[in-house]
Image (tube, rainbow, N blue to C red):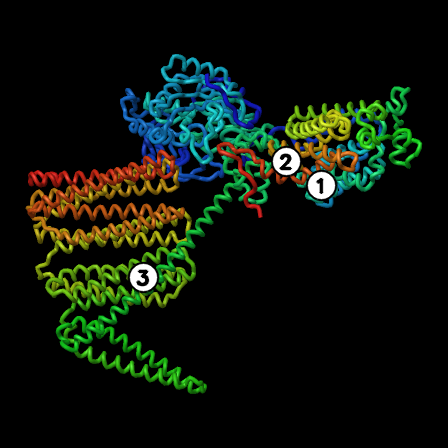
Amino acid sequence: MTRLHSFHGGIHPPENKRQSNGAPIAPAPIPAQLVLPLSQHIGAPAEPLVKVGDRVLKGQVIAEPIGRISVSLHAPTSGTIVEIGPRRVPHASGMEGPCIVIDTDGQDEWIEHAGLEDYTQYSKSELINYIRNSGIAGMGGAGFPTDVKLHLGDDHIVNTLIINAAECEPYITADDMLIRERAAQILGGIEVIAHLLQPSHILIGIEDNKPQAIRALEDAVRGNRLNIDVVVVPTKYPSGGEKQLIKLLTGVEVPSGKIPADVGIVCQNVGTANAIYRAVHHGEPLISRVVTITGDAVNQRHNLDVLIGTPYKDLLNASDVRRDELYRLVMGGPMMGFTMNSEEIPVVKTTNCIIAATEEEMPPAPPALSCIRCGMCEQVCPAELLPQQLHWFAKGKEYEKAKHHNLFDCIECGACSFVCPSNIPLVQYYRNAKAEIRQEEAEKQKAEYARMRFEARQARLEQEKIEKELRRKARAEEAAKAQASKKDSAAAKPAAAQDNVKALKTAAAVARTKLKKAEKAFLAAQESGADNLAELEAAFKVAEQKAQDAQTKLEQAEKGGAPAAAGAPDIKALKTAAAVARTKLKKAQTALKAAEEKGQDGVEQLRDTVTELEAKSEAAQKAYDDAQAAPAPVAAPVDIKQLKTAAAVARTKLKQAEKALANAQDSGEGDIAALEAKVKEQQAKVESTQKAFEDAEQGGGAAPATPAIDLAPLKEDMEKALAKVEKAEVAAKNAEEKGLPTAEKMRAGVDKLRGKYEEAKKAFEDAQAQNASAAPAKPAIDLAPLKEDMEKALAKVKKADAAAKNAEEKGLPTAEKMRAGVEKLQGKYEEAKKAFEDAQAQNAASAPAPTVNLDELKADMEAARGKVEKAEAAAKNAEEKGLPTAEKMRAGVAKLQGKYEEAKKAFEDAQQQNAASAPAPAANLAELKADMDAARGKVEKADAAAKNAEAKGLPTAEKMRAGVEKLRGKYEEARSAYEAAGGVVENNTEADTVTLD
Amino acid sequence: MALIRSSSPHLHKVNSTGDVMRTVLLATLPGLAAMTFFFGWGTLINVIWASLLAVGFEAAIMKLRNRPVSFYLKDYSAVVTAVLLALALPPFAAWWVTLVGVFVAIVVAKHLYGGLGQNPFNPAMVAYALLLISFPVEMTRWTAPFVLVDAESSWSVLSLGDTLAMIFGGLDASMIDTYTGATPLDALRHRGGLTTEEAWRQVPVLADGIGAWHAVSAAYVMGGVFLLYRKVFTWHTPVAMLGSLAVLSTLFFAVEPDYFPDPFFHLTVGGTMLGAFFIATDPVTAATSNKGKIYYGIGIGLLIFVIRTWGGYPDAVAFAVLLMNLTAPFIDQYTQPRTYGHAKANRGMKGDA
Ligand code: SF4
Ligand code: SF4
């Protein structure tokens, strides 16, 4: 026998268990309709797999888990799905939640099902997955998905398994009856759990007020090969509380803020053990449970085997309820249960008891008196708190003090309220205080976040200003240079002239404006007889001079530049595009500023837009400059593409502007006139760009283009667009979750971006198609990156999956999001794979001719690495400061890392291929080997560090361990690369096959 | 019938503050009986008179504060205060002494501080201390136990009528002479050069009358044990207080038995037992946690000894309790229990300005 310990406090409320444990468990009648909440427990709600009108069989999966902390949902009987929508769910707040409603057909027709023949033959993860898919969630309290707890054996050393059979709440006898009747099955379930967790010791804790159940358990345990002890504990509420039971049975306290697994203990409920048994040995998912129906308002108090989803009213009817006396309907026990205000609420996986109480039985609490500090609450508090002090602080909203008095260690057991002679609803005070503190903290975090954003924005603005200034200066210089050279040969540099003309025009205009201003000031001063007249006059003269200068220069330039400009139509178009981009940028900047001034929530969004536009503007400028620099024939195809993009961009802008206008018109807000003007402007631009594009296409179609070059930027565009879509989507989701008012707008933005992405993709695909037909060359190059893409995607999926799992295990709130991300990545991977396969198929037909621009790829790679490093540093910084953005930044780092790896791989591949075709494999090999060795060195170093950290029990150990794994992965990559390269040296054809596989 | 919504728990122990207070009242009965038996009707009359006054004041104040009168009267806390004060007063205390005392206790010490549960000082002891300072003569004129009044008759207390007359009418000097005398504490304090031993032999109240005090103390202990059994309070305060008083007096007595009285004397005379079980355990004004209650009790015991031995007042319980009331919030800050799952208890008070 194990030594019994004790916990502080506890109470002995009237047990009221006799009423309901007299009769054996009977099956409840199948109700006409079942209501199955998609959210049965803590964690993410399940995702429905059926639709209205489907016929389902008993045990059929009707909703599947999404996210780590989630389990499947099965049809409890055969019938037809009649509704998927919000219904009242068992929740303290009486809220509604999404439910699947089944009209039963009374046939109770099972789906094909069978248990596992020998569960020990399965791997742990398979078995745990099986349990997850059987919909098993903790059947005691909060309903934590059982599989999550069973996974704990992976990263915790679990030496004690505790089976909670205490059932300390008054009235409830469901577990008691279950044990009496199905002790052997429970033991079967315990064996499965033990197989998964491999504990050295199993303790079944049961209160001494259930002698029959104790006997049944002891009989079942006798002769079992496992090290199981049935430990009888004295009846005292709340001995069934997880933490209290652990203290009772082991003397160990679960440290505040930790989970039992951190001290090597896992708790499971008897009901859960039984459910696991049914699932593993009979293939029956969790579709029914034992529910105690008791209380003075029912004539028959008993335990029923109830299908999940049965509305309370059917159970009450089956128990011969006296509705006129029904006063309070409690789900769960009288100490911690919730009152339900509707009989329509269904039984869920955690419903262990329904108490239909009369008014005499559970009268309303008498009015509260003042606290007399009698200390009775303190004497009974199982968490060893000072409830009277907490009450004092909660009442006075002194939350700092309340926290200092460990308010958050309160398990809301209700013992203090129960004994309080002044009838103070203490638990209610604590719940309120906790909620308010949580809210306060969330708000504080938000404010902090806003402050940080503000500061970052200030810094960025400053930076932008400086950059703009620099750019302006650079342009001015260039212009001056061009001007100078133009004097030598105006016709030789038509483009520069064109640029000059424009710049000069602006300059002239500026000068004119200044002149006017100076004139005005001068006149005004003259009138008022100001004493700085002389100064003003001088200024005026200077301005006049400047204006004249500018005008002259402009005229000169126009004379010289006009013929040249006409000779380069696409350059002009490009220039327009650049100008358009600049305009957009300015507009967006203005909008941003305005938004910032108003402190709107969408600022971040706008900032992104600005940055994006800036990039575009620069790109356009660059394209323009390139075009100018490049000889016409080469530039032509490039132009076409860019022009096309420009056209598309302009179209999108037009749409945007139109939408904004419509919005404004609808809401009657904003400057409609201005918006209208904007739309017109956009329209004009669209037309011009479109025309430019068409023109260029006509001209460029004849040119012998190098389409392979086109493809890369297009693809890049496409990917960029996708990334944007994703980013925007995340932001939008985030906003939606936080209920920000901008969420809707953001959502609209996401859709827009998605449109862009689709365009980009289409452009890319078009180009690809063209390439395929125009140039039958180099499919092998296509293949390698595609394969890399695919593999990278797979790796990402895996990484993200691991991260998500991790997060879920730690119960991080981001887990759900991460899970969604994983799914998205999975989708991408599938896409990549398909693309690869397609390409492979194509390749099979065509001949190989690999040439790749190594330098370009290398530059790409290095740029990516730079970004990764920068981002990482930032993320680390954020983490160190414990900033709330750290997590996001980390995710960003991971993304960048992925990109970097992609780039690197592309580079390496190209290198390898080049090596294969050119005669320099040895050098490559050496390099690869060096890579590999370096990677190994890193792994070893990191490993040592991680071990060290683990030995010291540092909290970073886990992270470090993850880092080691990552490095190891890299090392493995390096090694395989090396090996692949080695293959090339010996046998070229073989290497090809390797690549192709 | 509409289903009600309420927060858990849905069960409550059938007890109320009124029940707690009534239990306390019940526990004072042995002491009251002993007092009446040994010192006559005075205490009983005072208890009834004080209770009536307390109910009256409480009702008036509740009315003034716009609270439901009968609802708050039902908590019996005013009556408990009055009874405890009356038990501590000299049996022949005049009606106006009691009146002033109850007024101070209920109106000043309790309600001016915000009512039940908010008062930092034990109301009965505030009143007692105030009376002692204001009316030293009345407050030190203790009744002699009946054994000293007339050794011949078996129970020679002043008749009920005479007692009433004495409390509510004027004082009859002859009666005062006959029926009053020094308390053992006074006797020992003003023994005029006698050693403790000699005093024990020569001073009548010590030699013959001490039994009355022992009996009354025993009666209070009975009441206290009853309350402990009913879990109205925990053992911590009384045990700590009596323990520290006993230890301290033993030490001094061991060193100089001629000068210091023995520990048993300290524990059984004056208000020691009344204080230990009925005054110091007043939860409103005591320290909160079990550990805190031990410190609090020790403090009271210490102060009782110090004030009795070197102070100028006839008894020390009231002052000791009041002084410790003052320190209770501070004690609370440093004696938080260690919460489940925490390595050690929190100290001090966060968020305090
Ligand atoms: S039980 Fe109630 S009256 Fe007593 S100290 Fe606690 S909160 Fe105050
Ligand atoms: S509800 Fe909280 S404060 Fe009250 S007894 Fe339970 S754990 Fe202690």
Give the residue number, with chain letter if any, for mark 3.
A658
Question: x%, y% of residue A231?
Answer: 47, 19
Q: Residues within 10 Å of mark 3 (few under 14, many from 20)?
A: some
Q: Is residue A283 above or below residue A675?
A: above
In the rendered image, the vertical position of residue B333 relative to residue A78, given as above or below: below
In terms of image quarters, where does ligand 1 lie?
top right
Q: Amino acid at mark 2?
A: Ala
A612 to the left or right of B188: left
Residue, x 74% and y 35% (percent of image)? B307
Name the side, left or right, on which A43 lies relative to A870: right
* Secondary structure of the residue carrying numbered label 2: loop
First of labels 1, 2 by sequence position? 1
Residue A106 is left or right of residue A655, and the answer is: right
Q: Mark 1–mark 2 contact, CB under 8 Å?
A: no
Are circles 3 and 2 on residues that touch, CB within 8 Å?
A: no
The secondary element bearing badge 1 is classed as: helix
Measured as percent of width and height from the top left, residue A673 is found at 36, 68
Q: In the rendered image, which residue does mark 1 sit on?
A: B110
Mark-to-mark CA distance, 1 and 2: 18 Å
Q: CA distance from mark 3 to mark 1?
A: 73 Å
In terms of depth relative to the viewer, which is nearer, A811 or A480? A480
Nearer to us in this view, B336 or A650: B336
On the image, the x and y values in percent for residue A674 come to 35, 67
